Image (cartoon, grey):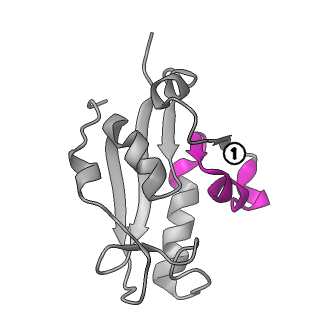
């Protein structure tokens, strides 16, 4: 049985900022860097599985729902059993720190965009996730 190919695509600010009050700290910024990052996210995840927490899945706009499979992750789910549901598929794990704490060990590819944001945050990218070690696919 083939395993799922587990990836993450995310954006961080200049100092690793990722979240503020349950949102992206730069949410609503319409400058070209931010618009390009959102477009790239939807382009790269197209045709694949996006597995994330309920808030992240709820934030996916209607136009993007038809061309990717959305799957809601819950903290009670076993990551290994959850990923086994998507054998042979590319699964992008989204949702931020609590989710990546649970799934980082399975991630084979981290696609991180650094944005020019340098403001406040209450969630930060943890470089230990990169060392958690998914198997190469």
- State whether residue 42 is above or below residue 8: below
Q: Is residue 135 left or right of residue 42?
A: left
Residue 2 falls in image quadrant: top left
At 48% across and 70% down in the image, what residue appears? 37
Q: Quadrant of the C terminus?
A: top left
Asked whether 83 falls inside the magenta stretch, the response is no
Query: Is 63 situated left or right of 83 in this image?
Result: right
Q: Up-down: is 48 above or below 123?
A: above
Residue position for label 1: 67
Q: Which contiguous range is marked in magenta?
A: 44-65
Most extreme residue toward the top is 1
Tally of numbered discs: 1
Q: Secondary structure at mark 1?
A: loop
Asked which quadrant contains residue 21, the reply is bottom right
Looking at the picture, how far across and down is residue 36, in whole percent?
50, 73
Relative depth, front residue between 27 and 78? 78
Query: Residue lying furthest right in this view?
Result: 62
The percent position of residue 84, horizontal first and vertical second, equals 51, 21
Outermost front residue: 76
Residue 30 appears at what percent x and percent y? 59, 87
Magenta stretch encompasses residue 51:
yes
Q: Quadrant of the N terminus?
A: top left
The residue shown at (43%, 81%) is 121
User: In the shown orientation, is residue 123 left or right of residue 28?
Assistant: left
């Amino acid at each position: 049985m083939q395993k799922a190919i587990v990836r993450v695509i995310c954006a961080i600010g200049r100092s690793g900022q990722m979240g503020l009050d349950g949102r992206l700290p730069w949410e609503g910024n319409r400058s070209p860097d931010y618009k390009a990052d959102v477009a790239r996210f939807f382009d790269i995840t197209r045709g694949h599985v996006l597995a994330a927490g309920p808030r992240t899945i709820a934030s996916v706009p209607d136009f993007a729902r038809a061309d990717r499979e959305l799957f809601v992750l819950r903290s009670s789910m076993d990551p290994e059993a959850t990923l086994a549901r998507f054998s042979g598929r590319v699964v992008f794990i989204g949702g931020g720190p609590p989710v990546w704490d649970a799934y980082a060990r399975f991630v084979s590819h981290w696609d991180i965009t650094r944005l020019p944001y340098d403001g406040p945050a209450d969630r930060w990218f943890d470089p230990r996730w990169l060392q958690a070690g998914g198997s190469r696919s």
